[in-house]
Image (cartoon, rainbow, N blue to C red):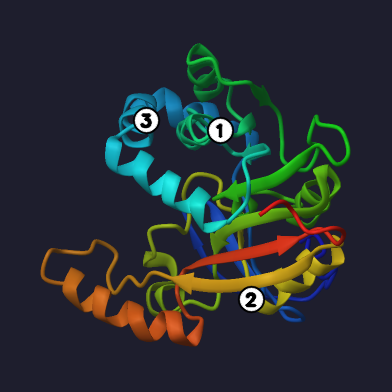
């Protein structure tokens, strides 16, 4: 097994196998990594070819989702500037940002959703997060939603995000937590394990250290989300919502969000 992509450690504790994904935990930083049954790039076009494109369009451009995107943009408390959405899919977030006055660009691994975003007039490049095709200091805000868990080298992607941010610019990264109650309880039964090229589940400490090594200052970190069963039946959802409150308070939610800034003059507010 390769060295840990976050800390460089070479010793792993084997956990389980699911759908050809062999999961192990780094003994040094506790990040969980999978050896995949095929190269990660093979997953993404296949995902959309299975009929996910129409569902993704409907979800990303639904009025309720667009309103959530606008609230997220407002939470950064920035004047509209240059924004990059890494892993932009069909461009729903980019469209909301453009309508809010931002100058936008996107990056997507699969050409299928990228074509849909371009059809809507959104500038989207096809490529990988660890080799961003943008100049140094080009952006005021970089978003990486559900990206890092797909990468063989997430630390390189964080360095690239830092590179393309201008001094004072902000990064928002949202990914999966190996410290979560969901993963501890469900293990291989958790819905995000053994699917869609998910390579990494991150320990909080290792992810924060990787962000800092990339040259960014941590502004905040929070977690959310609890699953108590592989398939959450209706009667379980109220319990999961109730468990989400202490999970957030203790940092044990399965979605971990980090906000960080590139050192330098504060971004416009």
Give the residue at mark 3. Answer: 52
Judge whether 134 appears above or below 21 on screen.
above
Element type where label 2 sits in the image: helix
First in residue order: circle 1 vs circle 3:
3
Nearer the observer: mark 2 or 3; the answer is 2
Q: Which mark is residue 204?
A: 2
Which residue shows up at 66% across the image and 38% down it? 83
Judge whether 68 appears above or below 219 on screen.
above
Q: Is residue 15 visible?
A: yes
Judge whether 97 appears above or below 255 on screen.
above
Q: Quadrant of the N terminus?
A: bottom right
Location of residue 226 in the rendering, given as x and y in whole percent from the top left corner = 35, 72
How far is the residue under mark 2 from the one under mark 3? 31 Å
Element type where label 3 sits in the image: helix
How far is the residue under mark 2 from the one under mark 1? 34 Å
Location of residue 144 in the rendering, given as x and y in whole percent from the top left corner = 62, 48
């Amino acid at each position: 097994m390769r060295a840990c992509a976050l800390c460089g450690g070479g010793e792993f504790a084997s956990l389980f196998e699911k759908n050809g994904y062999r999961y192990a935990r780094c003994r040094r930083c506790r990040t969980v990594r999978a050896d995949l049954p095929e190269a990660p790039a093979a997953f993404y076009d296949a995902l959309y070819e299975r009929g996910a494109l129409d569902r993704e369009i409907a979800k990303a451009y639904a009025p309720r989702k667009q309103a959530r995107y606008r609230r997220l943009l407002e939470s950064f408390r920035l004047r509209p500037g240059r924004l990059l959405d890494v892993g932009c899919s069909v461009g729903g977030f980019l469209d909301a940002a453009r309508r809010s006055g931002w100058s936008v660009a996107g990056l997507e691994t699969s050409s299928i959703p990228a074509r849909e975003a371009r059809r809507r007039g959104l500038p989207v490049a096809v490529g990988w997060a660890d080799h961003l095709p943008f100049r140094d200091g080009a952006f005021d805000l970089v978003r990486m939603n559900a990206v890092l868990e797909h990468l063989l080298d997430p630390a390189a992607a964080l360095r690239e995000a830092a590179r393309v941010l201008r001094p004072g610019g902000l990064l928002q990264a949202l990914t999966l937590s190996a410290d979560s109650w969901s993963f501890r309880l469900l293990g291989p039964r958790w819905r995000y394990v053994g699917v869609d090229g998910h390579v990494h589940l991150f320990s909080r400490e290792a992810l924060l250290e990787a962000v800092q090594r990339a040259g960014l200052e941590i502004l905040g970190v929070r977690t959310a989300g609890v699953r108590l069963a592989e398939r959450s039946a209706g009667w379980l959802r109220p319990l999961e919502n109730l468990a989400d409150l202490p999970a957030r308070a203790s940092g044990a939610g399965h979605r971990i969000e980090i906000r960080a800034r590139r050192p330098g003059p504060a971004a416009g507010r």
